[in-house]
Structures are given as C-alpha cells and as structure tokens.
Amino acid sequence: MLFYFEERESREPIGVIVLEGCTVELCESESEEFAFAVKFDCVKARVYKMAAENQAAMESWVKALSRASFDYMRLVVKELERQLEEVQEEARSSQAKNKMKKQVQAAASVQPATFSLQNAAITGPVQEGVSSRENGVSWSKPTSVPNGVSEGCVWEGDCSGKGDGVRPPPVPPRRKTNGGSLESPVSPGTGCFSKLHDWAVVARIQHDRESNGHHGWQ
Amino acid sequence: MRFNEKELVFLSRQPSERAAELGMRGPKKGDVVKRRQVKLIVNFLFYFRIDEDEPIGALLLEQCRVEKEDNHAFSIVFLDEAERKYLFECDSQEQCVEWIDAIVKASYEFMRKNLIHYRTEIHRLTGKDPLEQYGISDETRFQVNSGLPPLPPPPT
C-alpha cells in the first residue's frame, strides 16, 4: 500500500493507494523530471502520477512499487520454500551417501559435516552446469580421492591448488543474474520469476493522455 | 482517509482464496448478525450483501487477531481497537476452523515472516543468501529485525 501524507511531519496520511494489480511506468512530463506513474487495469481507473527528486530516487521508487504486490511476495515465498526443500533433500541424500563413503574411506581427512554441507551447495548449481562455467572455474573430477571411490559428484572450484584434493574446495560466490539473462541460475523453471526483477522493462516513455480527468501531481 | 475505491472494487471481483455466505455482525453496539457474502482476496476480507456485485466494505487483515468463538463462530479484532470485534458465524465447526486458518495466513506480515524464515534456513544450510541473486537482499522488509511490532498477548 502506498500511503501519502500532506507533509513530511504529518502523523496521519491523507490517503492510501492499494497497489494490488497495478503496473508502474516511467512517464514523460513537461513540468517534472524523474516522473513515474502507477496504473491499473480496471475501467476508469485513476492514473497516479508522481515525481522523484533525482534519477536514483525515481528508479528506487519504481522498483519498490512494482514489487509491492501480494503476488510478488507470494512468488518469492514459494520460490524460497522450493529452494529450501531442495537443499534439505540434498542434505538428506548426501548424508546417506556420506555414511557409505565413510565406511570405505578409512584414511580420508574429510570432515563429514562440512562434506555434506558442501555437497548440498555443490550439487545444486552443478545440475545447471552453466553458472560455474561462467565463473571461470575449472572442473575437476574426484580422481584424486585416495581409494579411487568416485561418487560421480563433480567438484566446483579450483582443485589444483589443494594438497590432497579430497577436502572439498570452497564454493565460489554465486554470480548475480544480470539483466540479459532471464533464466534463474537456481532453476530453469523460474524464468518468469526472474523477469519480475527485470524492472527495466517498465521503463517506457509515455505521454500523459488520460481521459478521465485525474488530478495531476500528488 | 481517502482510498482508491475503484481499484479496490475491481480487486473484490478477482478470484478469491475463499468465499462463503456467513453470518456477520459489525463491531458497533446494537449491530446484529446479517447474512453476507464474504470473500478473502489477498489480505482483504470483502463483504457483500447477498447477490450484490459491489462490496459494502472490506477489512484489511493486518495487525489483527482472529479468535475462535462459541457456536462455529470466529471473531476478528484489530490491534488499535481491541474492543471492536467483528463476528462471523459459520455453518460448521470445520468451516470455521478453515476460515480462521485462511485468514491467519492471508496477511502480508505472515508471508513476510515465512520468507525470512526460509531465507535464514537456506543461508544456514548453504552459506548463501537466496535473495542475493535477485537483487533484493537489502530490502528493509526482508530483514530479520524489521517489520511491525508483534501484537500484544490476548487479554486473559
């Protein structure tokens, strides 16, 4: 919800705009720079035009307003819920694998706890394959494991520098998705979720030509 | 306080999380129970006269407490006006419990808390912040310590 007050120090708002279902756009105006508008899909809806004080503030407001809806929040929660389940599942299955490996690998210096955690972190992005390549990291198969047991899991990160090659290397930081790629590195299925963040899409210049006599600047 | 009524009415026509005909009694003294069509959409509870298209009103389900009442009923009170109770009468115990659950989970605040919980858990298990790749990890509303103050405990 967007509350608006008469003045900075006012204690009570004059009004509120319920933002559910709205779109936010940049707009062109003769009198105001850094203008943007909140629009709704329904018939005879008002257009709420606002202007920020500078480019950065305007961008920040447009971003915040387009992410204010309930739907957006719901999407984020669902996505995180899914990710958590995935991570928990990986942790569970790698702990099961780990128990077997422990019995075979008597001499290994691997700490079980960190091992399975690292596994949990690694197998996620490994399945996508793309992100680690982009990180400029070289793949290294676990052939250096002393007794030759290979689980088929691939180490992400630079293994060559490590002495024994058994200790899992630190996972490189995940790269941020840039505007060009709409596919989430986490899961291909969340392509449209990433799109929500591509708020640059809403940066269309529009002339104001509302037909229903809105009040103008607020 | 002004509000964008047209857009709210438009919202009330969208698919709802839950809708039913319930008995509803307003918070004022002398209010009686009336049959209303009640519709839960995002964090609003819209209510209509039976067979009418436009809602008579809506309750914003934030900073409120939902409680079970006798006889398949539940009530909603708001933090700042604890004496003003909205009462809803259901047809069955089951329906009543379902409504309470739905309303509790409808608030933005509830979702926010879930989000923070998942974020913290994922970070704990993987060492990574799941919000970072989406560029929203710094938003105030997603920080652990931000948000509305908790409701005071119910009066004993």
Image (cartoon, rainbow, N blue to C red):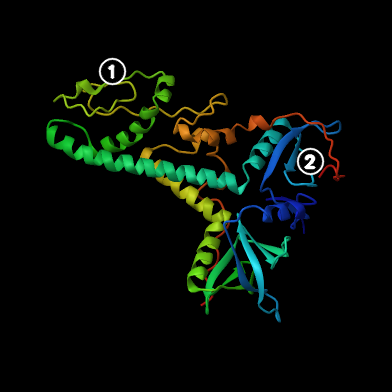
Compared across the picture, whether B21 is left or right of B130 comes to right
Query: Foreground residue, A74 or A91?
Result: A74
Determine the image quadrant of residue A145.
top left
Which residue is pictured at 43% across the width and 25% down the height?
A: A131
- At label 1, the amino acid type is Ser
Query: Foreground residue, B84 or B87?
Result: B87
Q: Mark 2 belongs to which subunit?
A: A
Which residue is pictured at 76% across the width and 55% down the height?
A: B5
Q: Are marks 1 and 2 on the same chain?
A: yes
Which residue is pictured at 23% across the width and 21% down the height?
A: A163
Number of the label disc, if any, that sits on residue B81: none
Q: Please provide percent x and percent y for residue B64.
A: 59, 65
Does residue B135 appear in the picture of this structure? no
Q: Is residue A91 above or below residue A188?
A: below
Determine the image quadrant of residue A118.
top left
Q: Is residue A56 above or below residue B98?
A: above
**Within 10 Å of the Cα at label 1, are there few (<14), some (14-19), or many (20+) other Cα atoms?**
few
Q: Please provide percent x and percent y for residue B3.
A: 76, 55
Compared across the picture, whether A162 is left or right of B49 comes to left
Circle 1 or circle 2, nearest the eye: 2
Residue tagged by mark 1? A160
- At label 2, the amino acid type is Lys
Q: Please provide percent x and percent y for residue B133.
A: 50, 33
Which residue is pictured at 81% across the width and 45% down the height?
A: A218
Q: Please provide percent x and percent y for residue B41.
A: 61, 56
Q: Mark 1 belongs to which subunit?
A: A
Compared across the picture, whether B125 is left or right of B156 comes to left
Q: Earlier in the sequence, mark 1 or mark 2?
A: 2
Does residue B103 appear in the picture of this structure? yes
Number of the label disc, if any, that sits on residue A49: 2
Q: CA distance from mark 1 to mark 2?
A: 58 Å
Task: Say which element carries label 2.
Answer: strand
